Image (cartoon, rainbow, N blue to C red):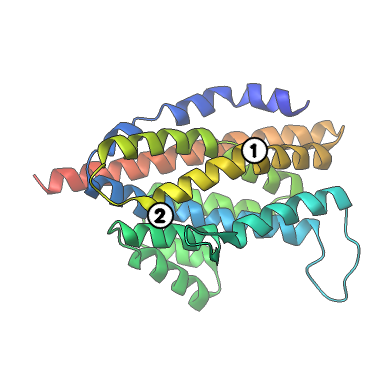
Amino acid sequence: MNISTINNSILRHRELLLQHSLYNKVKSIDDLRHFLEGHVYAVWDFMSLLKALQSKLTCTNTPWLPVGNPEIRYLINEIVLAEETDLNAEGKRQSHYEMYLDAMKACGADTSAVEAFLEDVVETQNIFVSIRKSSLHEDIKAFLDFTFRVIDEGKPHEIAAAFTFGREDLIPSMFTEILRSFKQNFPEVNLDKLIYYFERHIELDADEHGPMAMQMITELCSSDTRKWKEVEEISMMALEKRIALWDAIEDNILQHDLASI
């Protein structure tokens, strides 16, 4: 097995995600806000997948030791550098999660729920407890639970699979569709920070992070058939959870629209 095999295996799931009806449901500024308020959890937990990979594939403790493959260390550290300390629209350093929060606030979306959720994570010191006791949509809970189960129980190549095929490799195509819809439907709303965030992701992930993540998978799995099979399985599950996340956000938008009639 190899990258091409995995791409062929997950093709149907990719198409389901890229053709999801959610994109056509974001028609008003309120719909946009509800989209952002649901999607922000994927922006946040992506950072946790990233740091889990860095923790497993490099040395983050002292005394320092030369852990693992230097090529893999380089790949993950390069991705971390941009995701955790990129330049925002004003040329200041921010993580992509912090950029997203600022973009939400700029267009009037509510960040209090996700900020309260992170405060609870700090308080409980147990992400699974925080997920379970939250008032999030059940499919958003399942999405987060899957991510942190993979982080907690997964081998490096499995975490890399969720990171690469469930997220990083999809971002350019997904965000291009979303961005096109936003520009068309909300010309009167100032979406500068949001557009910058999406365009920055498209630029980084298509040109740099996507290929780097693919190379990381190849380095981690090498010629080990069992590892490639596990990558395939996790990738399929990650995409199923991502589709369910989109279902949940769409459901929240529809419920809000019905309540406002």
Residue 137 seen: no
Indicate the position of residue 238 as horizontal and vertical percent values.
Answer: 56, 40
> Can you name the residue that lies furthest to the right here?
66
The residue nearer to you, when weighing 230 against 242, is 242
Residue depicted at 34% across the width and 47% down the height:
35
Residue depicted at 34% across the width and 35% down the height:
181
Q: Is residue 158 above or below residue 235?
A: below
In the rendered view of the protein, which quadrant contains the N terminus? top right
Indicate the position of residue 64 as horizontal and vertical percent values.
Answer: 87, 71
Q: Residues within 10 Å of mark 1 (few under 14, many from 20)?
A: few
Q: Is residue 234 left or right of residue 65?
A: left
Indicate the position of residue 219 as horizontal and vertical percent values.
Answer: 83, 40
- Which label's residue is closer to the chain start, 1 or 2? 2
Q: Is residue 29 left or right of residue 133?
A: left
Quick one: SS at disc 1?
helix
Q: Amino acid at mark 1?
A: Asp
Q: Residues within 10 Å of mark 2 (few under 14, many from 20)?
A: many
The residue nearer to you, when weighing 191 against 212, is 191
Q: Is residue 242 above or below residue 107?
A: above
Give residue 207's mark: 1
Residue depicted at 42% across the width and 33% down the height:
177
